Amino acid sequence: MSMNYTEQTPWSRKDLLDYLSSHLKESRLQHILGVAKAAKELAALYDSDGDKAEMAALYHDILKDKDKAWLVGYMRDHGEEPGEGLLAWKTLHAPAGSIFAREVCGQQDEEILRAVRYHTTGRAGMSLLEKIIFVADYIEEGRTFKGVERLRALAGSDLDKAVLASLESSITYLRKSDAHVMSQSLEAVQYYTEAIAGKDSK
Ligand code: FE
Ligand code: FE
């Protein structure tokens, strides 16, 4: 693996796969590969760049196995305050993963970095690539939760509706577990509710 940190040579797909296979647990790796496959399929369906979608997917959970203290420390070491994320620390692997992709892996594509950063909370006004990664994370072939078949069908017909349904299902789950719901996710629900109402009325 070539890792020239000083020159920030971007990691190739193979560098990244080697890293993931040696640093993450097997079930995590399988999930990531599933998201990469789903993301490539969605990219083909919605005329987006399949290689970019695959790279963003391979990065998305690169720090998912880290604990709260590590993630908070890592973000602060790179000048970012986790803020509201402290109330929902399991979302922190997303912004921290985007910092890791940039700082350690030399990934400079802002679109890829944003797709990694917002894959857990979503946000209002996501780019096509951000939506592809957000939805691929829910519908990859290893997912078995109730309603996943409906989400897969929606993803094939209307990506915004799939984003909204994914957000709603995760918010319902968080509320049931008495967990904090990030304001970014609530803003995204409002944004996509309005976007879909606007489309449907045309
Ligand atoms: Fe994640
Ligand atoms: Fe994931």
Image (cartoon, grey):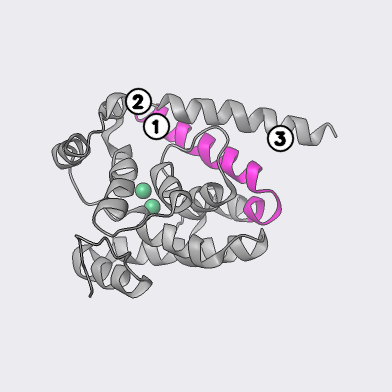
Q: Which region is colored magenta?
A: 153-178
Q: Nearer the viewer, mark 2 or mark 1?
A: 2
Upstream in sequence: badge 3 or badge 2 = 2
Upstream in sequence: badge 2 or badge 1 = 1
Decide if residue 135 is on the left or right side of residue 7. right
Report the residue marked by disc 2: 180
Q: Up-down: is 131 above or below 35?
A: above
Q: Residue at x 58, y 35 (%)?
A: 125
Spatial CA span between label 3 and label 2: 26 Å
Upstream in sequence: badge 3 or badge 1 = 1
Q: Secondary structure at mark 1?
A: helix
Report the residue marked by disc 3: 196
Magenta segment: does it hold 177?
A: yes
Q: Residue at x 57, y 42 (%)?
A: 163
Q: Are marks 2 and 1 in contact (CB under 8 Å)?
A: yes
Question: Nearest the camera: 13 or 188?
Answer: 13
Residue type at tag 1 = Leu
Magenta segment: does it hold 27?
A: no
Q: Residues within 10 Å of mark 2 (few under 14, many from 20)?
A: some
Q: Nearer the viewer, mark 3 or mark 2?
A: 3
Q: What quarter of the picture does the N terminus occupy?
A: bottom left
What main secondary structure does the magenta stretch of the protein show? helix
Q: Secondary structure at mark 2?
A: loop
Q: Secondary structure at mark 3?
A: helix
- Residue farthest to the right? 202
Residue type at tag 3 = Ile
Q: Residue at x 28, y 60 (%)?
A: 105
Q: Up-down: is 185 above or below 37?
A: above
Spatial CA span between label 2 and label 1: 7 Å
Report the residue marked by disc 1: 174
Spatial CA span between label 3 and label 1: 24 Å
Q: What quarter of the picture does the C terminus occupy?
A: top right
